[in-house]
Image (cartoon, grey):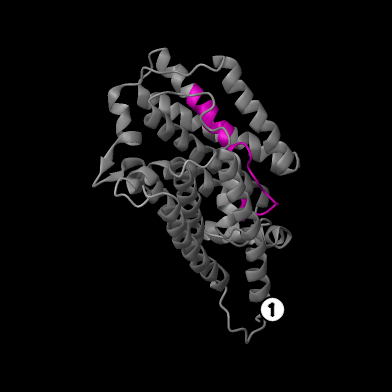
Amino acid sequence: MIARNSRFSASDPLRARLLVLIGLWIVSIVAMSLLSPYFLQASTVPYLLQYVPVLGLLGLGQTLVVLAGGPGIDLSVGAIVSLVSVIVGALLAVGLNIWLACAAGLVAGALFGLVNGILVNYLRIPSLMATLATMFAYGGLALATTEGRPFSNFPAGFAWLGLGQTFGIPNAFLFVLLPVAVILHVMLTRTVIGRHIIACGNDDRAAHLSGLDVARIRTGLYVLSGVLSAIGAIIAMSWFMAARPDAGKGMELLAVTIAVLGGTHIFGGTGGVPGAIVAILIVTTLQIGLQLANISAAWQLGVIGVLLIGSVSSLGGLKLRWRTGS
């Protein structure tokens, strides 16, 4: 337990982490501007923010799953993006209204998340194995049913979400990611549900003994992660004006990176939305900057991998210093 005379509050590790992340983001901006003379151009900001919403929604969903402990993880988020894209594209192809097709996609995302939650929390399959299996299942189904071909012929008005801007800011960032982030932050910091999520992550046995249905709470977060992935799929379709069966390929590991880099402890109980948002900006800044500098994708992955290793190490140090009060 924490000593009564500790000079730290419960939120200090997250505040310290947030300051470190903001500093790291500033360093990333400076480094990318030195690598590429095009990075600091005015057009870079909306271009960067165009990339943020899809990955951001997946990162926020991953943050909630990991935060609730277990240890929970959702490796299927990218595959859900791909499969929901195929479902919406197929419904549009048979004549369904685009917005009704998107609503069906949200329901499908929730069901895919529910499958993950049942496998992990009721059938007791380790989350790494369960969601790895559903990642292959969902992704394979998306490719098998389309033979790798995308759906197109989306109505022109659908581009408003993924390609439109308001005051120079992409609509998906302004009207989707930011409101979702605010709602989730309020949920975690100001509601009973948020306290229950943190309690499950800190000590699931104690949470169970206090009357919380831990399995139900964690399953609900997998469902929410699936819904956020489906929203990400809708944004991606609006951006590319096509439903690609590989739309979410590789996003699952970036989502895990964002959650851990953002300060969410890998075993749960510590973390939050502000850190995840800054982590999303860091990862996207590095990706865009390295692309503008014509640095290969292999090096981009290497940089993010080093960042993740340093993130896990520094998070452990911050949490240890907080607990010891040194």
Q: Is residue 59 left or right of residue 167?
A: right
In the figure, is residue 54 to the left or right of 207? left
* Res. 63 visible in picture: no
Nearer-the-camera pick, 158 or 147 = 147
Q: Residue at x 66, y 26 (%)?
A: 137
The residue that appears at 58% across and 79% down in the rendered structure is 8
Quadrant location, the C terminus: bottom right
Q: Which residue is mark 1?
A: 324
Q: Quick one: label 1, few (<14), some, or many (20+) residues within 10 Å?
A: few
Residue, far left: 167
Relative depth, front residue between 233 and 108: 233
Q: Residue at x 48, y 65 (%)?
A: 23
Q: Is residue 238 above or below residue 153?
A: below
Looking at the rendered structure, the kind of residue marked 1 is: Thr
| Main SS of residues in magenta | helix
User: Is any part of residue 258 visible from this angle?
Assistant: yes
Determine the secondary structure under disc 1.
helix
Q: Does 65 sit above or below residue 141? A: below
**Residue 78, above or below 4:** above
- Which picture quadrant has residue 91? top left
Quarter of the figure that contains the N terminus: bottom right
- The image quadrant that residue 2 belongs to is bottom right
- State the image coordinates of residue 132 (x, y, percent, origin top left): 69, 36
Q: Is residue 75 magenta?
A: yes
Give coordinates of residue 243: x percent, y percent.
45, 23
Report the span colored magenta.
64-86
Q: Position of residue 322 (x, y in %)?
A: 63, 75
Q: Choose between 302 and 203: the one closer to the eye.
A: 302
* Residue 21 image point, x, y percent: 51, 62
- Comparing 305 with 181, the one in front is 305
Left or right of 105, for residue 203: right
Q: Is residue 291 magenta?
A: no
